[in-house]
């Protein structure tokens, strides 16, 4: 955090991380103002929407710390900039990550603009990440949070130089256990509050039930990699690559070539006990393709292409050896950047990646520095015959 005292507007979510962030800034002597962002209001009164409870918690935190708090409604911006894109991606058969778009469009754009109108020099959030000014380049770098189990730089990879220059991440230097300890020590009312999970506008509700409200069901066939119809799906939008649960085909056994392939691996009871996984979504033919076995070749990719890239430094990274994540909480995977420009990049991995999913983000790292990334739109598989089967279906 900056040693120069300034006015800082903190996004108070009602959670412990943003609460401790505000406390640390106030303790350091900064003038701190809290903002509670309301991003969703379609079902305020439902059992799954916690916005009202979260605001009560945020207000209680502000009272204990001794700062002002303002309730700001960004729901219209969220619906236009985030939710509309979320629905478009699902309808196209992809699996988007709205939290990444929310950070870029709401928390570090609409919220930042509002904070600047309040005279803020900086904004702060409870994300586990860090910002560093590189004296050699004069550029701000986005770094991983020091707690590897909580690092959230993946969700922040679309932030640019202007946004990072105005941002503080006070808990990025701490481990979660230390944040909890500080909260308990100073008597914050949400010290033991559970971390929020899932997408903010969905909460803990069943995901399929939520999508049903916005996307029409279009049932179609479920096919195995041999081309055999083994069930019916309820609509491609309701499935994601690598999904195992909720397929409704648990009792279906592999047959023919698919069974032989499993048995060739030396698996006991192959075809009987190996679970089924979603491997492909053919939107044109409204077909869901599934395979049996976690390590089926259709689920393994060693190259991917991403588009709609955003680079923290404002320009594409160099070609060569890097590391990448294709989903949150994944370990960094060694890769080679084989092509990159302002809009797209192509990566080749040293080891195959499991269930690389169009719509999700591929995020590049050079050590602890997050370079940016893009939205996955294509990947290959180790078994080229897999694509031939799909093309012939």
Image (cartoon, grey):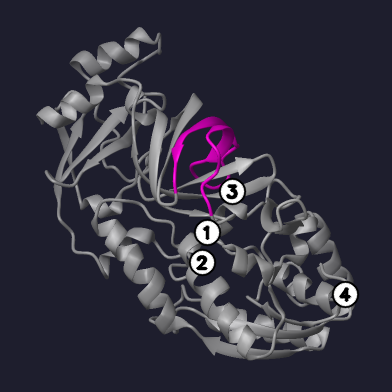
Image mark for residue 104: 2
Q: Residues within 10 Å of mark 1 (few under 14, many from 20)?
A: many
Q: Residues within 10 Å of mark 2 (few under 14, many from 20)?
A: many
The answer to whether marks 2 and 1 mark residues whose Cβ atoms lie closer than 8 Å is yes
Image mark for residue 158: 1
Marks 3 and 2, how far apart in space?
Answer: 15 Å
Residue of label 3: 371
- Residue depicted at 22% across the width and 27% down the height: 387
Q: Earlier in the sequence, mark 1 or mark 3?
A: 1
Instruction: Name the front one of labels 4 and 1.
Output: 1
In the image, residue 312 lies at what x, y percent?
58, 55
Marks 3 and 4, how far apart in space?
Answer: 36 Å
Tell me: residue 77, above or below residue 152.
below
The part of the chain drawn in magenta is 315-341
Tell me: residue 319, above or below residue 77.
above
SS for tag 2? Answer: helix
Q: Earlier in the sequence, mark 3 or mark 2?
A: 2
Instruction: Name the front one of labels 2 and 4.
Output: 2
Q: Residues within 10 Å of mark 3 (few under 14, many from 20)?
A: many
In the image, residue 318 lies at what x, y percent?
55, 39
Residue 125 seen: no
Foreground pick, 59 / 285: 285
- Residue depicted at 61% across the width and 83% down the height: 36
Marks 2 and 1, how far apart in space?
Answer: 6 Å
């Amino acid at each position: 955090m900056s040693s120069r005292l300034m006015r800082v507007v903190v996004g108070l979510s009602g959670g412990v991380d943003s609460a401790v962030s505000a406390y640390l800034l106030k303790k350091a002597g900064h003038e701190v103002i809290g903002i509670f962002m309301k991003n969703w209001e379609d079902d305020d009164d439902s059992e799954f929407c916690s916005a009202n409870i979260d605001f009560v918690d945020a207000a209680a935190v502000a009272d204990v710390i001794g700062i002002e708090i303002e309730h700001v409604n960004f729901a219209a911006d969220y619906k236009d900039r985030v939710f509309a894109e979320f629905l478009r991606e699902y309808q196209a058969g992809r699996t988007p990550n709205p939290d990444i778009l929310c950070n870029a469009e709401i928390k570090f754009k609409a919220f930042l603009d509002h904070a600047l109108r309040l005279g803020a020099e900086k904004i702060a959030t409870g994300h586990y990440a860090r910002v560093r000014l590189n004296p050699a380049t004069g550029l701000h770098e986005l770094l991983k949070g020091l707690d590897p189990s909580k690092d959230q730089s993946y969700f922040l990879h679309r932030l640019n130089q202007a946004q990072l220059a105005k941002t503080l991440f006070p808990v990025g230097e701490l481990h979660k256990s230390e944040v909890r300890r500080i909260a308990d020590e100073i008597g914050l009312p949400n010290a033991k509050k559970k971390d929020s999970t899932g997408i903010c506008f969905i909460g803990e509700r069943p995901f399929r039930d939520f999508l049903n409200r916005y996307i029409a069901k279009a049932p179609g066939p479920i096919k195995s990699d041999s081309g055999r119809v083994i069930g019916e799906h309820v609509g491609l939008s309701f499935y994601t690559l690598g999904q195992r649960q909720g397929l409704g085909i648990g009792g279906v056994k592999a047959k023919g070539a698919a069974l032989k392939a499993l048995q060739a691996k030396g698996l006991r009871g192959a075809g009987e006990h190996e679970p089924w996984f979603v491997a492909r979504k053919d939107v044109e033919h409204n077909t869901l393709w599934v395979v049996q076995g976690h390590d089926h070749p259709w689920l393994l990719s060693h190259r991917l292409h991403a588009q709609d890239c955003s680079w923290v430094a404002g320009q594409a990274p160099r070609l060569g050896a890097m590391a990448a994540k294709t989903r949150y909480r994944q370990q960094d995977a060694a890769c080679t950047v084989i092509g990159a420009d302002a809009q797209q990049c192509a990566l080749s991995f040293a080891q195959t990646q499991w269930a690389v999913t169009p719509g999700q983000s591929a995020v590049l790292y050079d050590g602890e520095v997050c370079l940016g990334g893009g939205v996955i739109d294509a990947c290959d598989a180790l078994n080229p015959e897999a694509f031939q089967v799909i093309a012939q279906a």
